[in-house]
Image (cartoon, grey):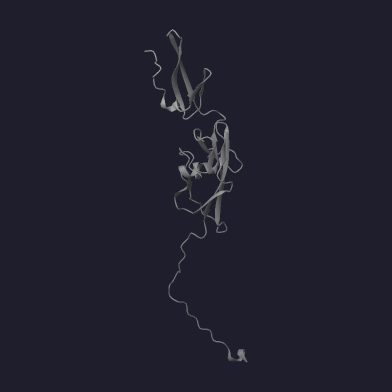
Amino acid sequence: MSPTETQAIPTAISDSISLTNNQVSLSAQDLGTFTFYIIGKTHGGAQSYQTVTTTFECGPTSSTVGLISQSTATSTFNKNSGVQAVLSDVQTKALFTSSSELCPPTTFELRDSSDQPITSTSSLFTVFGLQSRNDAAINVDTAIAMTDGTVTEVTYSFKVVATSGTNSASKDVSVTISICGSETISAMDATPFVQTIDIDPSASA
């Protein structure tokens, strides 16, 4: 069926389409593929139409990614307290800004402090459970091997890199596992220790 002059323009583009001097202009209000028609008419009533299909998508440079704060995000946990949430999916995404609401960052990669990929051979790969990570959330395994008592804490430093197209920004993150200070200390014997020492009277002369 041929289109008519009263046929509705798709809602997604109805507020962004304009026609000036036979030039059709569109501005992106949403992402997706939209179809509309351009109808040409003569004074005698003859008409023809052209189907137009337009796709709005996030291109390589459609959004600039930035940081809410330049300071390092820090967290501290006690050793052997299981897997702890460093940042939730929402909290990780909230660290970054985007110049386009339509094209926010789509990937949130963990890299080491030197900005290198964390591979399966890295200890951080296991510590942060990257083998099963499927969203922007970051979790840490607080299990710490036995130490000699001189090590009071272990700190993992890394970066979260948010990317939209070819644009990205990185956030420094530091997670500290407290080894000393999380233990419960108690006395071996609750009985008071009493000792009497006699002093030679001549020693006080």
Q: Quadrant of the N terminus?
A: top left
Q: Position of residue 124 (x, y in %)?
A: 53, 43
Q: Position of residue 187 (x, y in %)?
A: 46, 69
- Whether 30 is drawn above or below 193: the answer is above
* Quarter of the image where one finds residue 189: bottom left
- Whether 48 is drawn above or below 83: the answer is above
Q: Quadrant of the C terminus?
A: bottom right
Count of picture labels? 0
Q: Position of residue 15 (x, y in %)?
A: 46, 28
Q: Is residue 183 left or right of residue 116?
A: left
* Quarter of the image where one finds residue 12: top left
The one of 194 and 103 positioned closer to us in this rendering: 103
Q: Is residue 1 left or right of residue 29?
A: left
Name the residue: 44% across, 10% down.
48
- Whether 199 is drawn above or below 157: the answer is below
The one of 10 and 115 positioned closer to us in this rendering: 10
Q: Is residue 121 visible?
A: no
Q: Position of residue 19 (x, y in %)?
A: 50, 21
